[in-house]
Amino acid sequence: MGLNKSEFPPKGKSQTWRAVFLALGLVAGLGAAETKTVVFFGDSLTAGLGLESPDEAFPALIQQRLKATGQSWRVVNAGLSGETTAGGLRRLDWILKQPVDIFVLELGGNDGLRGISPESSRANLQAMITRIRERQPNVKLVLAGMQMPANMGPDYTRQFAAMYPDLARENHLTLIPFLLEGIGGVASLNQADGIHPTAAGHKIVADTVWRALQPLL
């Protein structure tokens, strides 16, 4: 459907027609078309497991900061407690049905805690990166790195930690080196399980994530 010159309104009626165009979605830069989307795709860290309210989780805190920029951004929290890289790969297509401007991939922690081989986790993460870019060619992709506790063994922890910077370098991604920087191992910032951040911990996570997102906005 197009418009020819004879269909444009005469002077003096431009405001009325502008409202009509806006209702039809024909005014560039206005309405729903200007809203951009950030997807946080992860596990219980993204979902905010154990918090009193989802509003305390770092994706919601990022939404507040985006709102303060004056731009129109929508945050989608696609965190699922217990999610592994294999599970994330299986449900990825569902989230990619919507247009995405920035995609934050936060998975692998549960793989590590279950002792899944880093090679398997890396292959799943790479498959997700490839699929995201195939479905959303213009997306800006952020990879959130994780680390394993020392009791997983030196070889395992080293291989696990290395897969994130390796994937970021090979795929030219924005990397968050360690999502829980300043939080991991700090009892006062973690819940009783020692794994999931408290509300105060999520504020620090939001700071870390925000530093990675700002240059992409």
Image (cartoon, grey):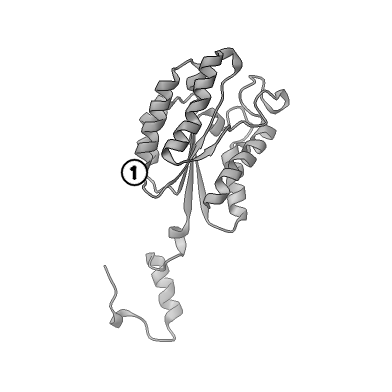
Q: Where is residue 78 shown, x and y percent of the image?
A: 47, 36
Instruction: Work out whether residue 18 or residue 138 is closer to the camera in this orientation and state it.
Output: 138
Q: Residue at x 60, y 38 (%)?
A: 58
Counting labels gives 1
- Determine the image quadrant of residue 52: top right
Q: Where is residue 19 shown, x and y percent of the image?
A: 44, 72
Instruction: Work out whether residue 108 or residue 159 is closer to the camera in this orientation and state it.
Output: 159
Q: Amino acid type of disc 1?
A: Arg
Element type where label 1 sits in the image:
helix
Q: Residue at x 47, y 55 (%)?
A: 35
Considering only vertical position in the picture, is 171 above or below 147?
A: below
Q: Residue at x 34, y 43 (%)?
A: 135
Quadrant in which the N terminus is drawn: bottom left
Q: Where is residue 138 shown, x and y percent of the image?
A: 39, 50
- Residue lying furthest right: 188
Q: Where is residue 40 shown, x and y percent of the image?
A: 50, 39
Considering only vertical position in the picture, is 45 above or below 58?
A: above
Q: Residue at x 43, y 80 (%)?
A: 14
Horizontal relation, residue 195 to residue 107: left or right: right
Q: Which residue is mark 1?
A: 135
